[in-house]
Amino acid sequence: MLRFDGGSVDLARREVRLGGQVQHLEPQAFDLLAYLVQHRGRVVPKAELLDQVWGDQFVSDSALTTRVKEVRRAIGDDGRRQRLVRNVRGRGYRFVGEIVPPAGGRSAEPILGRAHDIARVTQLVSTSALVTLVGAGGVGKTRLAVEVAAGTRAQCPDGTFFVDLSALATGQAVVPALLRSADLQVEGELAALRGLTALDALVLLDNCEHLIEAAAAAAEAVLGFGGPVRILATSRERLGVPGEHVWPVAPLHPTAARQLFLDRARAASPGFDPHVDPAAVHLLVDAVDRLPLAIEMAAARVGAMGMAELAGLVTARLDLLRSPRRATTDRHRTLAAVIAWSEELLDDRERAAFVQLSAFAGPALGADLDGVIDGGDALDRVCRLVDKSLVIAEVSTGPTRYRMLETVRRHASAGTDNELGLRHATWFTDVAEAADTLLRTPAEREGHQTIEARVDELRAAHRWARSHAPHLAARLTAALQLHAHSRLWVEPAQWAVELAGIIGEEEPLAPQVWAALANAAAHQGRFEDGSALAERALRSTDPRAVAVALEALADIAMYQGDLTRCRSLARQLRDIGERAGDHHAVALGHVDEALALAYGGNPGAALELLGRRERSSHAPSDLAWFHYAKGEAHARDDPDRAVAAFEKAIKLADGVGNRFLGGVARVSAASVYARAADPDRALRAFPRLITDWQRHGNLTHLVTTLRNVTELLVRVDAHEAAAQLLGALQSRDLKGSYGDEARRLADARTTLERALGSGLLQRSMAQGEGKDLSWATALALHTIEQLAASADATTPEIT
């Protein structure tokens, strides 16, 4: 943690505090602040900030200015005084605030008694691929790991990824959670972890003990693939993986334990006498095995009873706090005894809230408490648990979240039952359905945020419902489909696959599952599977399921070049949307029909249809789809209008976080630049688009993007690479080309034959034939990298 005047930046937790309060910052704004702080010895040029923070994304200087304003707001600065972030006119930005140096190499808020651990673990992390911190529950493993991660961030150019396994209930969720933390494709089980190997990053794998086999398998897979990525794990037992370096985290030294108790007691009770009898403190901290969590819980009681009484009570209950055995499990039982003792101080209503709060998989929003905790006044009762240190209130500028430490949650969860599981799953299904309704309105962004804030709870709700209430799981699958599709979040489709093996044909909501799976299959290039699933869903009387199925079928028809069928399906989609009052389905029906017209050689009719149907009442993403379709209609004859329309689509999509649509529009914009205006600009755009489609498993759009890259390579005279890529993309397993795309590829082949000659063209294409998409993707990225090295680095990007 780095402190400056009035605030602090925690690089490991990606947290900014001002006056002790956590400040909300969008991810890019935090990255901007972190980069300025880490390079505070110099003026950082705008071009460097754009490159380091946004990478290959299309952004303008205005985006940088906006993020700088966000940073200044968060750290208490402004554009007039510029006391912390200074704009050096014509050059860039510089962080000019004075950073308070950590004393003795430790953080601004040092961990008592852990200086030696921090130094040794930091050294191990710098030389070892896997380091595991092992110790009893409550001993401070996570805090130590976070401190080490903060100190090594500068050596991790690709970042630090925090993966808390405590919110996961099964080993099958470990790999998806790990990949999601790094924004990688969440498919393929252990093999998908290969995507981590290219990252020079530190993965903090926290709370492994309850999923030890799955965590060990994931760690061993990552190590087996090689690469610069490192893992720092915390667990109550070693992972048992070859090459693992284990660092035991022992209870605090007696001096540090006594100081921790005194510090926390003073914070908990302003009237606490700091000159209390040292022998009583010594007795107390020894009775709780000098575990930081237990010490803090005991210190929280000093306001309710005197030290002598508190120490006497702990001593009298020594049989509960200490076991004759000295194994790790004994230390865990000691902590459980402290929690049980704390629970005894609760009244009946507090105890009920204590047990029911444990149903939450992660930190709970106050808005969700009454939905899961019965009996009313849930927030008041949870706040009383905060006062008694059984719950932590995470206070920030956003909504407060209420979190149980994992050891506490597990103790409390022993009193849960299926009725509580049903309440939790029902509540979060209702929340997801309400959010899905918002996604189809101008309040779309709010709907996405509602779901994003509850990912852990939705994952837990779906898992419970699959086993106990499949109809709820089907409802939740349907409610998450549009959000997941927009955000390129594959995990809900995996849940739907598991549900499909459980739910019966007779279940009225089963078509919701088939429709969601059909949509996912369409974008993974599995057209036959997608069509079969969608046809099953069409038998439903549920208009929402039918609409999703028709959307999938229309997309498949478009991808396969059956534009007549696509138009027919699009009109059916529009009609059912109008009958059901689903504005999103209506909008997509018009867009799909317009795209079919444009791709079929009738752009005028497409533009006329779009002009008559666009409404301000549409959701931002739906408006973006209208602009995207207009861009496609103009693409052949009016490149300037096409790019302007694509840029409008990108702006709207980015505004609500629609990564799928933003990617589609960027591919089309880059393709227009490659063909008609500025190939160097396209060279800068394509790598990010290629890797995004690849990492999220969207093979359909990856193929489209690579075909556009083939045309670009022809235009910039990279003829042999273009021929190899063309050969690889002719596989029968890939979606076919038609319309303008097919004509452009035919023209590209003609150009290549003139440039290379028939013999060399055939030999070059043969080198690509039979190769898979991974090979084609690697070839495209390598070739573009070589070409871009000689391009003008100041070329503007598509915003």
Image (cartoon, grey):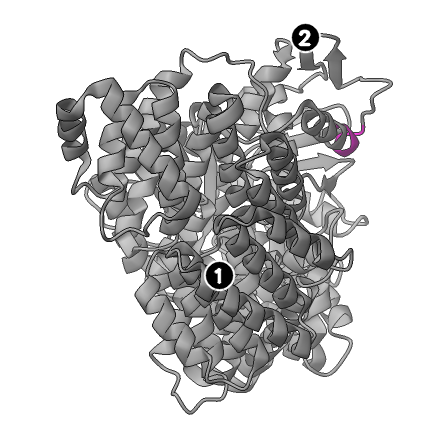
| Mark 2 residue type | Arg
Q: Can residue 400 be seen in this view?
A: no
Q: Which residue is drawn at 22% across and 47% down?
A: 731
Q: Position of residue 213 (x, y in %)?
A: 27, 59
Which quarter of the figure is the N terminus placed in?
Answer: top right
Label 2 Cα crowd, 10 Å radius (few <14 / some 14-19 / many 20+): few
Q: In which quarter of the image is residue 794?
A: top right
Pointer 2 or 1: first along the chain: 2
| Residue under label 1 | 167
Q: Does residue 46 lie above or below 209 as drawn?
A: above
What secondary structure is marked by label 1? helix
Q: Nearer the viewer, residue 734 or 749?
A: 749
| Mark 1 residue type | Ala
| Residue under label 2 | 91
Q: Which of 531 and 348 is in front in this view?
A: 531
Q: Residue at x 27, y 52 (%)?
A: 190
From the viewer's perspective, is 718 left or right of 168? Answer: left
Label 1 Cα crowd, 10 Å radius (few <14 / some 14-19 / many 20+): some
Q: Give the range drawn in magenta.
A: 72-76
Q: Per the image, is 666 magenta?
A: no
Q: Is the magenta stretch mostly helix, strand or loop?
A: helix
